[in-house]
Image (cartoon, helix red, strand yellow):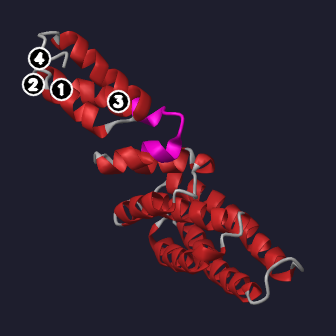
Amino acid sequence: MLEALGRGEEAQAARWSCFERHLSLRHLRDYLQRLPDVDDFEAEQRALSHVERYGSVTRAILFLVSWPALDRAARLAIARAGELDGNLYDSVTQAAEALAGRYPLAATLLLRAMIDDTLAQNRAGRFGHAARHLRTCASLATAVVRTPQDRNAAEDLLRDLEALRARCEAQARSLVTPMGNEMFYRYQESMIKDAQAMLAVLLQRSGAGRDP
């Protein structure tokens, strides 16, 4: 409407405001398309930096995956792993799948967030999905230790896995766990132990390869 009235600057300001507040892909694309070629790259970088500072880290990662800016999405998943919302199951699963090939550690952290949410909230309908995510984590573990930053994050993940394993054990033994569900927790516990063992070996190898 503003564009049709010849109020282009106001229209651009409105587009940017919608993007800033809601991380609207459409509004950002429309905004950038109307900039001169010499300005659009700088504006895009400024926009993506805003996304990385956005309050909801999960929504920010989903935006970056869709843009796409996978390197930024992976960096954000690692830096703010403790803020991930594992309840956004469908979207987070898609993000993890998009990152798995080039950024296995970030994908692992997204999968772990969903597993943790499933266990913490006792979401019985997602138990099968959580078991599948654990198998994926175990397979990704062979590729997560590449850089010193990866090593630090992998060490954090190893501690998180131990906490998750202990939670599975407690759930399996709990008297309030529905009959039959304890087997799921036992199965998850065994999968977590496998992932822990693989990560421990990788960390040992990466440590042996570093200069004293």
User: Which quadrant of the rendered structure holds the C terminus?
Assistant: bottom right
Q: Which residue is mark 2?
A: 37
Is residue 130 rendered magenta in the image? no
Q: Earlier in the sequence, mark 3 or mark 1?
A: 3
Give the residues drawn in magenta, as a range: 50-60
Q: Is residue 75 left or right of residue 163?
A: left
**Residue 30, image x and y in percent?**
19, 31
Residue at 56% across, 76% down? 134
Q: Residue at x 59, y 54 (%)?
A: 152
179 shown above or below 160: below
> Are the residues flagged by discs 1 and 2 in contact, CB closer than 8 Å?
yes
Location of residue 27 by image quarter: top left
Q: What kind of element bears circle 2?
A: helix
Give the residue type that dot 2 points to.
Answer: Asp
Q: CA distance from mark 1 to mark 2?
A: 5 Å
Q: Is residue 98 left or right of residue 91?
A: left
Horizontal side of 41 relative to 24 (left or right) equals left
**Spatial CA span between label 3 and label 1:** 15 Å
The residue pinned by badge 3 equals 19
At label 4, which amino acid type do we have?
Ala
Q: Which mark is residue 143?
A: none
Viewer-side label of 3, 1: 3
**Amino acid type at image mark 1:** Asp
